[in-house]
Amino acid sequence: MSHENDLLFHLRMLSDEVRMRAYRAAIEATVRPGDVVADLGSGSGVLGLLCARAGAARVFCVEKNAFMVDRARRVAADNGLSDRLEFLTSPIEELTAFPAPVDVLVSETLGPAGVDEGIFRLFAHCVSILPRRPRCIPASVRVLAAPIHYPALDARARRTARVEGLDFSSLADSLGDLPQVLPVTPEMLLAPERDLFRGAPGVDRPPGELTTRWDPPPAGAVNAVGIWFRADLSDGVPLGNGPEGPDTHWDQLVLPLLPALAPASGPLALQVWPRFVAAAPRWKWRVTWGGRTHEGDPEKLDAPGSVED
């Protein structure tokens, strides 16, 4: 099996200086000498290594990818910290116990929209198998959204609807049901960001439906909704991927509305449903404005209808 994508993914995260500086600061502020720590989804082992360097006596690195566990063991040895890192090769949600009570849970199971790697579900599971609730990094996560106009979405729909004189419109129409991870810039925003959800991993569970609305409504045609997160890793240590902040490896989640919804009177309402298949999210979304509705759902594309003669 090839592991190029695994390595590229983790090297990209390691090179995200915004991410790494924030996690280092939060770990140094939270981990106490002698603590037992669990690093959930440990990947390259970097967060576990930072915890050991901050004084943790034992760090359980939970990672289901055996290839990355092997590479992380080598990195731990390279840094002289093998004696304090213990690797548990398992999906997080299949753990039934830790080898010892855990004082701190740390994880960067954060997707572009914050909740889309299941961080609340994974923390809740780990807390349920521990004798006491540990300190958690991140301490809280907010999910935010804003209506946007993303010019490249319209351009892609136009370019792919007709190619070399051939009609591909039935394929191009699928763009309205396909969430994408794209860089959103501040000038694309048509209204202020609004909270979709906020909670504390290890304490709260995200609701099955996330909702918000804009009143007054956006000031232009809306062809997508952008979603991002803002987290407090610990007191005074923020981390986020909002459009106005420094670039991170996350970019933002973009939920297309194609064709665009033209300006209308009355509020714009957004409903989002994060549905998880294994560890991967399958977003469903609905935007209602001025009596018109766009509903995006990638599951609609799973079983395309037959073509009639």
Image (spheres, grey):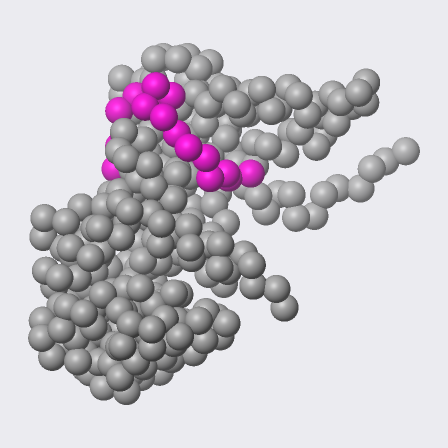
Provide the residue span drawn in magenta: 178-197
Q: Viewer-proximal residue, 125 or 252?
A: 252
Work out whether residue 128 can be spotted. Answer: no
Work out whether residue 262 can be spotted. Answer: yes
Look at the picture and state if 258 lies above or below 110.
Answer: above
User: Is 45 placed left or right of 159 in the picture?
Assistant: left
Q: Quadrant of the C terminus?
A: top right
User: Is 170 placed left or right of 59 in the picture?
Assistant: right
Q: Residue at x 65, y 29 (%)?
A: 173
Q: Which of the 4 image quarters holds residue 91?
A: bottom left
Look at the picture and state if 308 lies above or below 98.
Answer: above
Q: Viewer-proximal residue, 300 or 98?
A: 98
In the image, residue 184 lies in the stretch drawn in magenta: yes
Residue 268 location in percent, x, y? Answer: 36, 24
Q: Residue at x 42, y 50 (%)?
A: 12
Q: Which of the 4 image quarters holds residue 89?
A: bottom left
Residue 186 location in percent, x, y? Answer: 32, 23
In the image, residue 299 lies in the stretch drawn in magenta: no
Q: Residue at x 33, y 77 (%)?
A: 77
Q: Quadrant of the N terminus?
A: bottom right
How many marks on residues? 0
Q: Viewer-proximal residue, 69 or 124?
A: 69
Q: Which of the 4 image quarters holds residue 3?
A: bottom right
